[in-house]
Amino acid sequence: MKQKVNEDKAAIYLAVHHKEISEEIKKLSSVENFAGVLQAVVNQLRRLLDTGEFAKITRHIKYIGWIYKMGNEYIKYIIENLFVRSLEGLRKKCSPAQWQRIYTDIPKSFQVIYQAQNNFNQNR
């Protein structure tokens, strides 16, 4: 059985694929703050949205999807409860057409989690 990706490996992968914020990721990872690493990625996605770089946004979201798929239980928990929840904030910053463009490209597993979270929040 393949070994699951842990927080350290995930942070290394994220630093490589998010060159603009790699130093911030390394610093947060060095103090074992994986939630902070994901928050840095979310902040980067918001900056990319402000500059209209949709291809980069969807590429980064797909990469987080790969880490989610390969990750251990903690990785999955943090991604579901921090990263996928942050998509609602991203949606609010988008026009409907922009959100549709992003949403159709995100991994199906994230779409399912996102819908479940939003259905739960609407029923509260």
Image: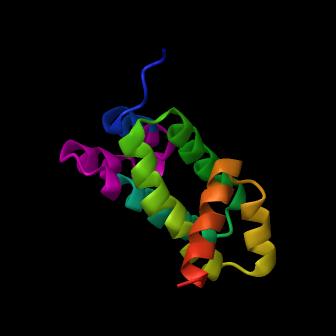
Q: Is residue 3 above or below residue 78?
A: above
Percent x, y of residue 40: 39, 59
Q: Residue furthest left?
A: 31
Direction from residue 3 to residue 87 in the image, left or right: right
Q: Which residues are magenta?
A: 14-36
Indicate the quadrant where residue 93 lies: bottom right
Indicate the quadrant where residue 43 lies: bottom left
Q: Main secondary structure of the magenta part?
A: helix
Q: Residue at x 44, y 61 (%)?
A: 81
Observer-nearest of 69 and 15: 69
Indicate the quadrant where residue 52 lies: bottom right
Q: Is residue 76 above or below residue 5?
A: below
Percent x, y of residue 16: 45, 37
For the question of whether residue 107 can be seen, the reply is: no
Q: Is residue 70 above or below residue 116?
A: above
Magenta residue check for 27:
yes
Direction from residue 56 to residue 2 in the image, left or right: left
Observer-nearest of 72 and 14: 72
Direction from residue 103 to residue 12 in the image, left or right: left
Percent x, y of residue 42: 48, 63
